Image (spheres, helix red, strand yellow):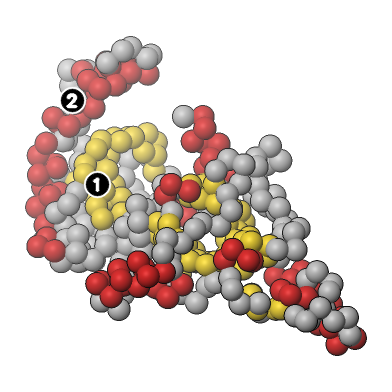
């Protein structure tokens, strides 16, 4: 539908509520699968899984998730009868429910972390769910040539030593000096990216370790230029979509650029520490419920995250955030 029609439909449906939150204020989501189509919807990843919902709140239909929820209480059909056919339906429904419920509620979570339990109430159930993560970014890593960060006077080494020792203001002074020395490099990178309609960038010197087989990239800790830019349609020059980058470009002041063709899905899995099917906690302030008539998937519940994936947490990522 058109934006105006979609807005009218959303207003008519009213504000949709989120699935129940856990004790920490997160939406528990059991991840099964992922999907990405960079050609059709760049900068977007869809996560598929299940959430636990109270049936009476979320659904008016008695059929949810492929089985008749009216039979869960053991009372038979909708008219309250207790015939043999109703008992059979109840047994079938229970078996189906068991097969669709994640069997280990603590999968990927330590015992000390609050995690959702399988449905135990007669008025709650597991249903299919999708989380549409939008407005994702790509991070490039520009490897400068050896002469960009030459340190003949030892200034960089001295600043790094002070920053490592925790001297107040030393880290900021180090970053400022790196920005100055990388000035020409940043200009060259901007000119290069502009050819691919990439203008909305953020650049920052960062330390990274390289551990693969290319000999033109220094091993161990080294300073590189991190370039972050959005991939969504309309974020390129003049409201266009950024064009694909070549695999391993080089220039006068940089030997290569890494992650030029990394997908949003790969970046999301790595940065959010997602290692496979398992529990994910979604920050309630970072997610919205999509009205059923406006969903882009066939899931019973669809959620959207307009601000990227920062509100997604595995147990490992949540522990990192708490330590910070």
What SS does tag 2 mark? helix
Q: Which residue is mark 1?
A: 227
What SS does tag 1 mark? strand
Nearer to me, 296 or 186 = 296
Image mark for residue 289: none
Packing grade of label 2 (10 A; few <14, some 14-19, many >=20) is: some
Q: Residue at x 24, y 72 (%)?
A: 4
Q: Position of residue 215 (x, y in %)?
A: 33, 48
What number of labels is visible?
2
Residue extending farthest bottom? 85
Q: Report the quarter where the N terminus lies.
A: bottom left
Residue 99 visible from this viewpoint: no
Q: Position of residue 21 (x, y in %)?
A: 57, 49
Answer above or below: position of 6 versus 306: below
Residue 152 visible from this viewpoint: yes
Q: Is residue 186 left or right of residue 301?
A: left
Nearer to me, 318 or 17 = 17
Q: Quadrant of residue 226?
A: top left
Q: Which residue is mark 2?
A: 177
Q: Is residue 189 left or right of residue 281?
A: left
Q: Residue at x 11, y 57 (%)?
A: 194
Precedes in sequence: disc 1 or disc 2: 2
Q: Residue at x 66, y 77 (%)?
A: 62
Question: What is the CA distance from the residue labelled 1 to the residue labelled 2?
Answer: 18 Å
């Amino acid at each position: 539908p058109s934006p105006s029609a979609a807005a009218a439909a959303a207003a008519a449906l009213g504000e949709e509520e989120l699935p129940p939150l856990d004790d920490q204020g997160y939406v528990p989501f059991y991840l099964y699968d992922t999907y990405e189509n960079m050609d059709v919807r760049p900068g977007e990843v869809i996560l598929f899984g299940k959430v636990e919902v109270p049936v009476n709140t979320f659904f008016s239909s008695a059929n949810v998730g492929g089985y008749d929820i009216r039979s869960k209480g053991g009372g038979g059909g909708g008219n309250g009868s207790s015939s043999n056919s109703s008992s059979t339906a109840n047994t079938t429904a229970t078996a189906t429910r068991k097969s669709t419920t994640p069997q280990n509620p603590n999968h990927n979570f330590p015992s000390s972390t609050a995690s959702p339990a399988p449905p135990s109430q007669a008025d709650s159930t597991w249903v299919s769910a999708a989380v549409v993560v939008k407005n994702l970014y790509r991070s490039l890593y520009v490897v400068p040539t050896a002469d960009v960060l030459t340190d003949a006077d030892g200034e960089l080494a001295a600043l790094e030593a002070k920053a490592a020792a925790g001297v107040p203001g030393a880290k900021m002074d180090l970053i400022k000096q790196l920005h100055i020395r990388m000035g020409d490099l940043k200009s060259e990178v901007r000119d290069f990216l502009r050819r691919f309609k990439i203008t909305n960038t953020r650049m920052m010197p960062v330390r990274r370790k390289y551990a693969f087989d290319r000999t033109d990239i220094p091993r161990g800790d080294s300073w590189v230029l991190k370039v972050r830019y959005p991939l969504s349609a309309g974020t390129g020059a003049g409201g266009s979509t950024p064009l694909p980058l070549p695999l391993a470009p080089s220039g006068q002041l940089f030997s290569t650029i890494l992650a030029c063709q990394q997908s949003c899905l790969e970046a999301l899995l790595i940065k959010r520490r997602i290692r496979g099917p398992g529990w994910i906690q979604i920050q309630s302030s970072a997610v919205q419920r999509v009205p059923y008539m406006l969903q882009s998937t066939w899931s019973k519940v669809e959620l959207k995250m307009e601000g990227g994936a920062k509100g997604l947490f595995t147990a490992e990522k949540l522990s990192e955030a708490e330590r910070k």
